[in-house]
């Protein structure tokens, strides 16, 4: 027989069929061919499932990025060295800085966050570094930041460290 159809299965769920054809003049599939082709079908099913999962992850990533970007609150993400990784549209509007101007720069250089007495919070007691050893999920600090053109803006900064299920900071 020059054709064989094999199910594409993930667990017990059939997600499709794969047809393997030979020319009419070729010999029929042998007993040796069948387990090899079945293993191929199993790998094809796994590849299809992985492609679906990658697509779902990409959609979810895009959805979350859209939520962060379009938030009315200014949102900035930083790495463990307090360098800016993300800066949403509301932060651009609040500070006067464009995203491309700030990415990779130290947040202390851009925001110059000060307490009400104008003492530097960043250089003396950065909330992100003090939170690393604390188990509090969120910390708030009131103070002042400076815009690109030097204006003072009163803010309440809310800090949160993203942690793994084991409780370790995720960078």
Image (spheres, grey):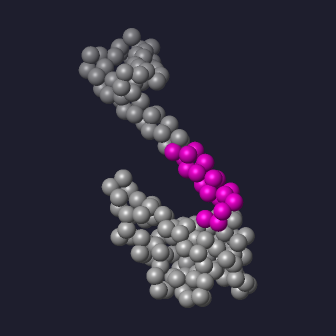
Quadrant of image for the C terminus:
bottom left
Is residue 104 visible from the viewing direction of this image? no
Place of residue 142 in the rendered image (x, y in percent of width and height, measured from the top left):
58, 75
Left or right side of 7 for 60: right
Place of residue 70 in the rendered image (x, y in percent of width and height, measured from the top left):
68, 57
Place of residue 32 in the rendered image (x, y in percent of width and height, measured from the top left):
26, 20
The foreground one among 133 and 108 is 133
Q: Can you say whether 119 is above or below 44 in the image?
A: below
Main secondary structure along the magenta-highlighted residues = helix
Is residue 73 visible from the viewing direction of this image? yes
**Residue 58 covered by magenta stretch:** yes
The foreground one among 85 and 169 is 169
Q: Can you say whether 32 is above or below 60 in the image?
A: above
The foreground one among 6 and 101 is 101
Magenta residues span 57-75
- Quarter location, residue 59: top right
Quadrant of image for the N terminus:
top left
Q: Determine the residue located farthest toward the left in the rendered image.
A: 32
Residue in the picture at 43% in, 36% down: 47
């Amino acid at each position: 027989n020059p054709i064989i159809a094999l199910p594409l299965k993930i667990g017990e769920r059939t997600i499709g069929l794969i047809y393997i054809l030979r020319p009419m003049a070729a010999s029929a599939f042998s007993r040796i061919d069948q387990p090899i082709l079945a293993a191929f079908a199993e790998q094809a099913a796994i590849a299809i499932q992985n492609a679906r999962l990658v697509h779902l992850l990409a959609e979810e990533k895009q959805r979350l990025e859209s939520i962060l970007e379009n938030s009315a609150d200014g949102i900035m993400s930083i790495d463990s060295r307090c360098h800016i990784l993300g800066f949403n549209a509301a932060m651009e509007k609040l500070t006067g800085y464009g995203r491309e101007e700030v990415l990779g720069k130290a947040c202390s250089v851009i925001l110059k966050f000060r307490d009400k007495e104008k003492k530097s919070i960043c250089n003396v007691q950065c909330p992100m570094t003090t939170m690393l050893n604390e188990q509090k999920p969120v910390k708030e600090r009131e103070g002042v930041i400076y815009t690109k053109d030097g204006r003072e803006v009163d803010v309440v900064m809310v800090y949160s460290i993203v942690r793994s299920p084991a409780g370790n900071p995720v960078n």
